[in-house]
Image (cartoon, grey):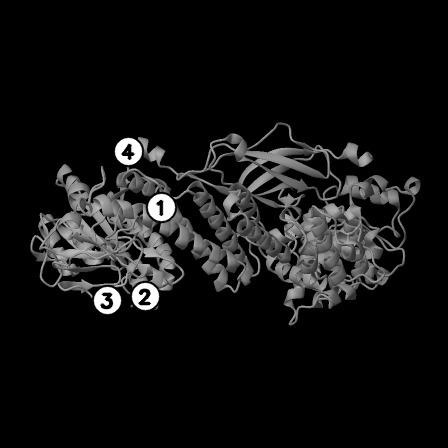
Amino acid sequence: MDTKQLTDALERLFDEEGERIVFWNDPEKEFLNFFEGQLFSPLANVEVVRLDQIGGLEAKLRIEQEQPNTRFLLYSPAEEPEFEKDWLLDVRLYSRSFRADRASIILDELKLNNQHLRGHVADRRKFFDNKDRLAKLKGLTTPDDNEGDLDRKMLAVVTKADQPELFNIIRTLFHAFTDESELDIRQPPAVWEQIAKFELDKSFWQMVKVAFGYEEETPSLGNFLTRLLVTDYAQHLKSELPGSLLHLQLPATGRANTVVCLAQWRDSSSRAASYDLLSEQVAASIHLSEHLHDLEIDALIDAMTFLDVEKAICRGLRDRVESTPDTINVDDVQEIAGRRSNGHWVSPSVQGAPHIFRKALRAVYEALVAAADFFNLRNQHQDGFEFDTASAMYRAYEQDLFRFDQLYRHFCEAADTAEAHSFDVLKNLREQVEAAYVNWYITQMSLAWGKFVDRDLLSSWKIAEVPNQQQFFARHVQPRLKESDKRKAFVIISDAFRYEAAEELARQLNGQYRFEAELSSQLGVLPSYTRLGMASLLPHKSLSYNAKGDVLCDGRPTMSSDQRSEILAPLEGIVVKADTLLGMKKREGRELVGGHRVVYAYHDRIDSTGDDRKSEGETFEAVRRTIGELCDLVRHAINSLNFNYVVVTADHGFLFTETPPGETDKSKLSDTPPGTVVAKKRYLIGHNLGNSEEAWHGDTKTTAGADGGMEFWVPKGANRFHFMGGARFIHGGAMPQEICVPVLTVRHRKDEKTRERTKEKTVTVHLLGTKHRITTPRHRFEFIQMEPVSERVKSATYKVAVYEANEPVTNIEKISFDSTSDNMEDRKRSVTLVLQDRKYDKKTKYRLVLRDADTDIERQSVDIIIDRAFTDDF
């Protein structure tokens, strides 16, 4: 050791740590020549005293009485004297000792109290050859660290672990496998060579043995990983572990720590990706999939260890839905899907590897729930649809039957997502749902509704207490403008936006602060096509047709935006395109609509997508995007453009099926009748058309209030006249999906009472019981969701664990509070946590913590006592 190192070490004691007296005993006389040869650089304001040259009593008097404020370095080329012979014992007890060998210098720099660690530090000299490693270790050590603590913290430095904690070090080591060019758990990662080089490998395996019970003649990271994963799987499996895997289970003493360690790994935002990759490799190596075929869902429901388990549960739940459509237990399906959707392999909040399965599996569960809900709804109407009046059936569609169309759309959307990621687990179920929707629901609706069209509606196109579409402006816009000269109205017309989609939009908007959305409907014009529907929504005293089939408002054309703007101009109105308005900055938008009392914003995604043969298969995706875009447009109109009254409506709805129609879906016409003006696949209009067995015949004066003598034919039920130009997406006919046109009124409420009523909140969750004490390795906590989920009371998903300070001492589990039930018993949820196998002090503060699953923000905590003393004794 050179003089600079000596000087630096001593200056640290005197200057940084403020010592006044430092003893330096040098029994080997290694540094005697430093003093005698004056090689030792003097320390500023420190007086050096040679204890071999003056007596102890003289030194004592000098230190304590003659120079009580002077700093002294007391050097002796001998061992410390025995207590009874040491004149300076009392001084030594309140002073510091210094040793100049390298190990002692390191101990001193690390501020370690235990001098017995000198030999241990000497054995680890290769580690300390690097100043950066020493500096990083210095930030981790505490004065009372022992050999094990020091090795663990050195491992943390070498592996670059986030914390010097064994589980963290293990996760970091496993994560290092994925840094290699080829993933192979049989070959240790590069960092292991460093661990072996610094002779920390034996210490690591000893720590692992103590914590997990893992012990092999030739231990390896790959074998250890395999046994951890198999043990975690076995701990959650509600069945016997296959005989071929039994030997891989870790001893009972290490199983609790296994569960905790792997749960924390899966929850790690920085390490979860490696868990996905490595667990998949281990599953393949132990041929796990071969053992899963005969296991029921109930046996696997708690296991999150392997992706293959998730796939098996998906298949099992699919089989259950497929095999029991007539007796479906929808609550059971929702419970399983909800539970697994919060888990590692499905939850969108997991920061795992971005492989195809996470999104695809979530879509599968969503599809299974939608299918179960669809079958359950069908079972409630298994005898078909019988109503006494058209009004009763129309109201039933508004209140309940629309859900068939909505659930079908949800199922198809989710199934499309799964298939887009090469996941075809839903193939047979898709055929089953399609058959139920097309062959049962659409057929039954056609028969039931067709009776009323034939008997009543063609001659009097009215539903009791339901306004007709051509009354839209008079009922929803004009009264608003008459309230005051300052009143304004913002109207959004989305082409082919049908009622079931509007119901979903209403729920979204009612979750917005200070928004109140109210959904009603209007009886759409017939034929239900764009030109007639759009014209009927404009202000007018009369509608009429010209000879070409164009629709006129008070004799004025209505086809283009400019023509519609001219009609709105006398009312200080303007026509805009929705996408143009959304693309503008707030200032630009205000300048465009400023000074106008009425804005008609036209949106067209669904119709433009569905009416094109090339894109009609993307109809449901277009509906999903439309809901989002209309939600944005409503918010923009209210929050940026200063409108507080918005109405969302449509020109017509639509029918859509995933499978193309067959010949039985065609109303065969040998030729269009004389007098035809416009002929489309779902309607034709003209003069003096006469009757047809293949179609419903009516006049637009009755069904739209339009003059001009224009008559129409529309195919009966859900049929088409022809299939040209695409035939899966259709409108123009008289089915409820086409003519039950939504009217969604959105108001911006500013009064205090409404402000409070429209505030969003997350469900309140309470932990049941008092004085929570954990006395066993596993503990079950029960929670209750205090209110049902609604439009303004949002569900919550939390990560739950017991913590000491900021470190979890249990596994981390996800739990969702999303019940819509009014029954409190239905809103109870429970979670079982496993304690890390270690010492606990019942006087230490532990907390049960609930953190937001998406943001990781702590939302709630409850003090917990961990008292394992009694059970540990036995």
Q: Which residue is mark 3?
A: 670
Camera-side residue of 252 and 288: 288
Q: Amino acid at mark 1?
A: Phe
Which residue carries the number 2 mark? 726
- List the single residue furthest toward the left: 555
At 52% from the left and 43% from the top, the residue drawn is: 327
The amino acid sitting under disc 2 is Gly
Q: Nearer the viewer, residue 128 or 653?
A: 653
Q: Amino acid at mark 3?
A: Ser
**First in sequence: mark 1 vs mark 3:** 1
In this picture, residue 143 sits left or right of residue 738: right
Question: Circle 4 sits on which residue?
Answer: 751
Query: Gap in Å between the C-alphas at discs 4 and 2?
Result: 50 Å
> Is there any visible trace of residue 617 in the rendered image?
yes
Residue occupied by mark 1? 402
Camera-nearest residue between 350 and 286: 286
On screen, residue 434 versus residue 491, left or right, reads right
Marks 1/3: CA distance? 35 Å
Q: Are marks 4 and 3 in contact (CB under 8 Å)?
A: no
